[in-house]
Amino acid sequence: MGALSSLLKKEVIQFRRNAFLPKLVVALPVMLIAVLPWAISMEVRSIGVSVVDNDLSPESRSLTEKVEFSPYFIYKGSEASYGDALKKVEDGSSDIILEIPSGYGKALRLGEKPQVMIDANSVNGNKGTLGAAYLNSIVSSAGAPVTGEKISEVFLYNPRNNYKMFMIPAMMAMVMVILCGVLPALNIVSEKESGTIEQINVTPVKKWQFILAKMLPYWIIGLLVFTLCLLLARLLYGMKPVGSIALLYLLAALVALVFSGMGLIVSNYSQNIVQAMFVIWFILVCMLLLSGLFTPVESMPGWARTLTGFIPMKYFMESMRGVYLRGASVGAIAKDLAALLGFALAFSAWAVASYRKRS
């Protein structure tokens, strides 16, 4: 253990002497947690809507009021004709036209489902598509009381439908992946470039001791950064985990082990820092896209859903959101824990095996 402690001491000294890494470890979680949830929010609000009411019935006025008081829309007033409403879209003051046909109220009273017209400006595709979807939901719910039903949406684990609540756990996962994946990927290869790796190769240090000494600092850094993320989420957004804190730290420790092992594997096979950077970023970007961070796994095509089974970040993302937002227990995320543990053991063994010690 004397050799291991000496190697760990060397890693700590190298980290402290580095002018950039300690600042990165603090700045990255602050940037991702404090800024990105605002910048990459998928919510679309302030959508201008013009209404053309050809019915002028109590039911059509009720529908207009639902649109007017919706938090997603800005009511731009009622127009006498579709042409007048279209002029507002063309001059940019409105984004969507809702045209209510004559006979709308009578059809509702007869238990029918009248059709209304929703025209969205497609210049901003995302705003138009989501705005039309929001408006369609309002129109559908407006006709429900006539048939004796009442449609009400309740977001069980996110009552206010706050998009940031879904993004914060994902941002924590991204911080862990970047710090525990990229930094180890640059570690061994930087020693190759500086020549210090040759001095270690001629010592009696065992391969597993060398790799473990490289991994341990990043596990500690990962857990410290994870703690900082939890504090930022609490201070900035008032979010605290619904589930067990200990379970969250177990997930963080496993994912730190997974990606530090992966980073060291890349470092072992790379000949220079540029090569290591390209490879690790290629791997991480693919994992981020297939993890469910930006696109739900259920909405991916079949071949992509199959690939997600080999993405460790997908299991971490699902279990993090489950514990953080729903209070999931160990039993509920047992499969995710088993998958992460399997990846951790496999990558750690591969990191030790791929290190070529010539002595």
Image: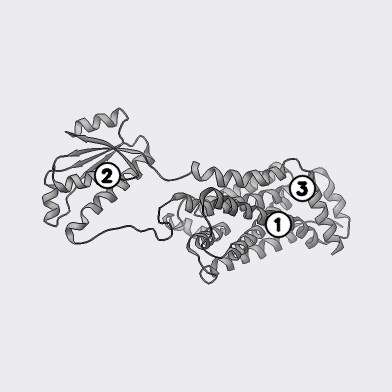
Q: Where residue 2 appears, x then y in whole percent? A: 87, 62
Asked whether, in this view, residue 41 is left or right of residue 350, the answer is left
Report helix, strand or loop for mark 2: helix
Q: Where residue 338 appears, x then y in whole percent? A: 58, 68
Of tags 2 and 3, the one toward the viewer is: 2
Between 143 and 337, the one lying in front of the other is: 143
Q: Is residue 334 above or below residue 13?
A: below
* Amino acid type indicated by mark 2: Val
The residue at which mark 1 appears reads as 220
* Amino acid type indicated by mark 1: Ile
Which residue in the rendered view is the most extreme toward the top? Answer: 91
Mark carried by residue 15: 3
Compare marks 2 and 3 and give the one earlier in the sequence. 3
Of tags 2 and 1, the one toward the viewer is: 2
Asked whether, in this view, residue 45 is left or right of residue 231, the answer is left
Does the image show residue 262?
no
* Amino acid type indicated by mark 3: Phe
The residue at which mark 2 appears reads as 67
Q: Residue at x 56, y 59 (%)?
A: 316
Q: Where residue 198 appears, x then y in whole percent? A: 85, 50
Report helix, strand or loop for mark 1: helix
Asked whether, in this view, residue 166 is left or right of residue 58, the answer is right
Inter-mark Cα distance, 2 to 1: 51 Å
Does the image show residue 86?
yes
Q: Dot 3 surroundings within 10 Å: few (below 14), some, or many (20 or more)?
A: some
